[in-house]
Amino acid sequence: MEHPYPEKISFFLWRLNNDLLPFPVKLNLFGIHGPFKCPFCNNMDTIDHFFLHCCFATTIWHHFETILDFCPVKSGTFINYINNWYLDYHGPIIDFNYLLPNIVTWHLWKVRNKVLYDNKLGHIPEAINAIKYDIFAISVAKPLTATILTAPFNIQMITPRKSPKTATLSSWIKPPINTYKVNLATRRLTSNITRSAAIIRNHEGSYIGHATHLASHNQTTNASYDALDYFIPLLNNIMPTNVIFEVDDRNVYEGVAGVSLQHWKYWPRIHKIQKKVKTNTWSVTYVNPKINRAAEFLAYHNMSIKTNGHHFSQFVGILKFDAVSFPYVV
């Protein structure tokens, strides 16, 4: 597979793989000696320590290991850890997992240089968001063989009837410039089994990625809201905070979820969803064309609120809706 990295990242990775980064052991060969210490924890400054065992690096690796529900063995060298990442991960080789180790390493190196040479502080949340942004940007620029939204969140990959890049769109409406649209659909296969699909495209209509999910479903609730329980955490976890999405559950690829669009005529339309950076909340607007009713919600972590009589809550980063309180038209 041809690597998708920009030249500066590729050059950095080449130097890392060939042990050419200016760490103390290498500097000693050129007669440069000194009491070199890790810029974050003052321990011995080595490649293995800085990229793997330093408290700053450990926190960042743990963040992404938690998202993936995967923890490679950290014993041995840093290079062994990276190799274990690819060898031990049993999900599909997708963009997020494929790009993550090298992008994390690159940003650890960038933060190190800012601390050493620019006298700046290293901020973990800032570094994590920068990592997510680079993964997302590289995935958009040079998409790999699968989607960035599949395996890390237990979303099962189901082969679509048509290729997502060539399937025709039905009544697809462009989102505003510099935003991304998520087309969401759910089909009930049996009385208690549903299949959901989400497809991401940018404002130009270019394919970004897709995910599908097959799950049991309580037939007393609205399946479209249940689908949000699966797909909103994906956006919340892996997308940078400055990315805005529009979500529309009626304009979907025919074939990806096997959805007949006529069945969605009277279903509530998910009009817009946006992550608010400062408050770390999601703003979701619903429009039901059948009853001409709209309600906007703010979902706060670990809180439950009521708006216009409708109740919902968010916990552990997952948006949960009390779908029964919404009008549901078959």
Image (cartoon, helix red, strand yellow):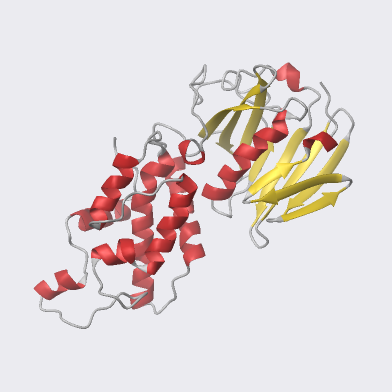
Q: Position of residue 3 (x, y in %)?
A: 30, 41
Residue 174 visible in the current orientation: no
Left or right placement of residue 148 versus residue 78 in this view: right
Q: Position of residue 279 (x, y in %)?
A: 68, 61
Q: Position of residue 330 (x, y in %)?
A: 81, 21
Give 222 or 290, whichever is nearer the viewer: 222
Examine the rendered structure and indicate whether residue 143 appears above or below residue 263: below
Give 128 or 89, whichever is nearer the viewer: 89
Q: Position of residue 295 (x, y in %)?
A: 83, 44
Residue 183 visible in the current orientation: yes
Which quadrant is the N terminus positioned in? top left
Q: Residue at x 29, y 50 (%)?
A: 82
Examine the rendered structure and indicate whether residue 158 appears above or below residue 176: above
Give 323 or 96, whichever is nearer the viewer: 323
Left or right placement of residue 282 versus residue 52 in this view: right
Left or right placement of residue 100 versus residue 28 in this view: right
The answer to which quarter of the image holds residue 4 is top left
Q: Residue at x 47, y 35 (%)?
A: 147
Examine the rendered structure and indicate whether residue 184 appears above or below residue 136: above
- Going by the picture, which residue comes out furthest to the bottom? 35
Q: Residue at x 54, y 49 (%)?
A: 237
